[in-house]
Amino acid sequence: MIRLPTCGSRITNHFSRVLYMIPILRLVPVLLVGAMLAPSLVQAQQPAPRDTLRLDAAVQRALDDNRQARIARRETDIAENNVSLGNAGFLPTLSGQANYSQTRSNSEQVFLSGETQSTDGATSTQSGAGADLRWTVFDGLRPFATYDRLGAQRDRQAAATEEQVETLVADVIEGYYDVARQQQQLEVLRETVAISRERLRIVELRRDLGSASDLEVRQARVDLNADSTEALRQAVALTNAKNQLNQLLARPENASTRYAVAPAIEVDTSLQYTSTQQTALQESPALAQAREALQAVRAEQRELRADFFPTVDLTAGLSYSQLNAESGFVQENTSTEFTYGVSLTLDLFNGLNRWRRTQNAEVRATNARLAVEDVRSRLVTELTNAYERYQNRLRLVDLERQNLEAVRANVDVALEQFEQGTITSVELREVQEQFIQAESRLLTVRFEAKQAEVELLRLSGQLLDRY
């Protein structure tokens, strides 16, 4: 872990030496030295914010509360529920029915003997109940193929959920370290403002004592305003980064941004391309989805081949009926029936639709195989590019670290020259700006190296194991 040194304490300490070494400033009270050192000392003595968010806590909260992650997990639950014997067609179907009816009739009957019989308002009641059982015991082994297809669809959805969750975790990690970067950048700029403010005070004092011009005072004030503007902009950037992180963590819309994160941006420098590629080809969620899609299409082909076989059904039924009548030849009738049997059905011709569906399934299987090859090729390409970016950023980190050390040495030399009066405060300002820019570049390349590391782990399916 690189701890970036701040230029504030260095420059203010050298400024204090300036007050004693420049003859015309020897009359300046010692209290001015304390005023110059106060900003950096106060900042250094400030305790860490009590509400410090850890990376592991942020990742866990996102996994638990993020809405997209919760939706993805429920989609996996739906796919899991679909994998059942009943949905595949292994189990029989049982249906029941019941009926009740009542009839009121008026009738007049004339018999051959000449007798007549009249009935007014005769009521007849009929009721019944029954149950039917049907079990397909053979239809070309379709249930086995259907069960395999449902299992492949479940595994594909599980891989899709894993990919979505890994993408979420990658976003949270990048968002977290973006807050860390913006947070450190704001500290650098705030310290720069404090230094520029003290520089303005010193130049104003030198002007009052006759050793500096109004031009130097105006230039110092312009520099202070520019530094203050950059600090204000950086504060907005930090707030925006925290708001983005809050959204990923599913915090309330009015959630506070008055929290800090761990400032260190630690990068794993031990990732190797060969082992990462091997892991990716085995564990990549994207590649797993393509493979499971191919398995689902192959199972669908087996389902369609079942259309060419006959269907054998076993049937059984039980019924009960009762009739009560006030007129007619039968006054009461009760019956109970039990039926059973077997049926065989064979579709002889359906307009060649079976052949059409079979051919389409073969085309889909070919497309699925091509998709697996395409995903594998794109995965290797993306992995190669990500690893090159990872190696490049690690080299840049080393270069920027060396550059920061060189600029720090320049600051020491420039401060010595400023004490001796061989350079002006404007020239010292240029060296100070170089130091700040070097710090900012190092922060940026370390963040980019972390991004490259996270992308490598995501592509290879190792991100959830690491975090």
Image (tube, grey):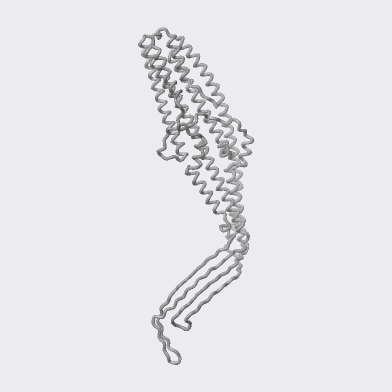
Q: Residue at left 56%, top 70%?
A: 317
Nearest to the observer: residue 201 or residue 436: 201
The answer to whether 296 is drawn above or below residue 340 in the figure is: above
Q: How many marks?
A: 0
Q: Residue at left 42%, top 26%?
A: 231
The picture places residue 127, in percent across and down from the top left corner, at: 47, 73
The picture places residue 300, in percent across and down from the top left corner, at: 59, 54
The picture places residue 323, in percent across and down from the top left corner, at: 48, 77
Q: Residue at left 61%, top 50%?
A: 295
- Give the left or right position of residue 166, taking residue 21 as reference: right
The picture places residue 141, in percent across and down from the top left corner, at: 63, 59
Kindly indicate the quadrant of the structure image that contains residue 193.
top left
The answer to whether 92 is drawn above or below residue 60 in the figure is: below
Q: Residue at left 42%, top 79%?
A: 123
Direction top: furthest residue:
23
Q: Quadrant of the N terminus?
A: top right
* Residue 143 seen anywhere in this rendered image of the structure: yes
The answer to whether 398 is drawn above or below residue 71 in the figure is: above
Q: Quadrant of the C terminus?
A: top right
* Residue 215 seen anywhere in this rendered image of the structure: no
Direction bottom: furthest residue:
113
